[in-house]
Amino acid sequence: MCGRKANLGCGIFALAALLLAAPASFAADARDIHERILTLDSHMDTPMNFARPGWDMMDAHTFAGDLSQIDYPRMVKGGLDGGFFTIYTPQGPRTQEGFAAARDAAIRRAGEIREMVARHSDTFALALRADDAGLIAASGKRIVYMSMENGYPIGKDLTLLKTFYELGVRMAGPVHFTNNDLGDSATDPKGPEWHGLSALGKQFVAEANRLGIVLDASHASDDVFDQMVALSTAPIILSHSGAKAVFNHPRNIDDARIMRLAAAGGVIQINSYSDYLVETPNIPARDAAIRALGMKYGPFRALAGERLNAYMAERHAIEAQYPLPKGSIDDVMAHLLHALKLVGADHVGIGLDWDGGGGVTGMEDVAGIPEISRRLLAAGYTEADLAKIWGGNALRVMRQVDAKAAEYARK
Ligand SMILES: [Zn+2]
């Protein structure tokens, strides 16, 4: 105890106490800040869970129990107000039948998102404009924007982009893991097919600008990124990407391009997908075991109850038998802090790829996100910076895209 007659020992004790208290106080500040600012994530694959039997957004789940990473209780815990819930469509055959099946699946998924919001309309609300986010949060509800990952459901019929806009989609990217009729993917093992966007892909950019859909270049090849930045009349976004200077992977983007994105008013939203953060070996035996498990049980998202538990137990056993290196929150922060140093707090945000492969050691689900804010504060970033990073920047891009669309509508 330090009395009025302070001595050296007491001073050191006080200093030590202050130093020890610093991280804890940042933690409390981080959590409080999430209550004051709009905290949004720009890439959540959570809608894949909406049609799971017995799965409800209002219930508490665990990643270990069913591989899900977002539900209402965990959003509350992490202080996440909402963000972009995506319609993800895996790339399939580029045939009339393939296009029709992808279109139908994407429309169904849009319906499932709207159904989730309708079923829990006292807790969630669909957002269509940038300003809706603040209004919805002020009403005490969580914010559901809709986005589209992979333009494959459009097939070759660009009129469908308007259909998706009318369903609520406000952000869209042309490609996913492999090339399609709109353009090249960053990760197609066959390499480039179009050397950027196809002619149809260029029209996709113009149509997104006209409608007021934010263009998303995550998963696109560098050439597609370059052409999207050049052709788009409004800023574009990378909804879930990393920095190539931190980890060299085709899904990450180099510094020169991050700087060009920022110069054009755009934003890079930092990802937490482990394969893009740390070297991840291919273990064919592991892949084969997971495939065999899938054959035995069918798609895991169709399972419930005891059958789901049995699937998860076998899956965990495979993961223990063939462990993979996993990125940590340190890796996510390395990408985030690098991008912030490079282009500043006006051009960096967060899109962690929840329920789509994201999540790292130290941040397994959305309940863990205040740790990002704690570390940003510890690195010297302010509450005003955090407000931009956690949603302000993405909403600014949305506002600019919307203003441009309004201009087109007047012409
Ligand atoms: Zn993705």
Image: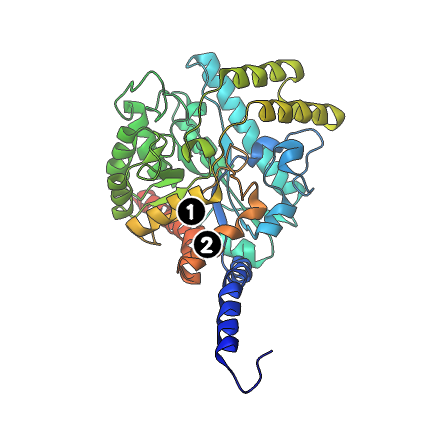
Q: Is residue 143 above or below residue 174?
A: below
The tag on residue 27 is none
Q: Quadrant of ligand 1?
A: top left
Task: Tell whether label 1 touches label 2 (CB within 8 Å).
Answer: yes
Residue drawn where x is 68% and y is 37% of the image: 56
- Cα separation between marks 2 and 1: 8 Å
Give the quadrant of residue 331.
top left
Front-lying residue, 61 or 197? 61
Residue 4: x and y in percent read 55, 87
Where the N terminus falls, by quadrant?
bottom right
Q: Say what secondary structure mark 2 lies in.
A: helix
Q: Say what secondary structure mark 1 lies in.
A: helix
| Figure label count | 2
Residue drawn where x is 29% and y is 49% of the image: 342
Residue 214 visible here:
no
Residue 61: x and y in percent read 67, 39
Residue 194: x and y in percent read 27, 20
Where the C terminus falls, by quadrant?
top left
Q: Is mark 1 within 8 Å of ligand 1?
A: no
Image side of residue 388 versus residue 143, left or right? left
Q: Amino acid at mark 2?
A: Arg
Q: Which residue is mark 1?
A: 333
Q: Is residue 331 above or below residue 88?
A: below
Residue 237: x and y in percent read 36, 41
Please rate how many residues cluster around mark 1, counting C-alpha atoms within 10 Å: few if below 14, some from 14 to 19, many from 20.
Answer: some
Q: Amino acid at mark 1?
A: Met
Please rate how many residues cluster around mark 2, counting C-alpha atoms within 10 Å: few if below 14, some from 14 to 19, many from 20.
Answer: some
Residue placed farthest to the right in the image? Answer: 306
Residue drawn where x is 39% and y is 45% of the image: 334
Q: Which residue is mark 2?
A: 375
Image side of residue 299 versus residue 255, left or right? right
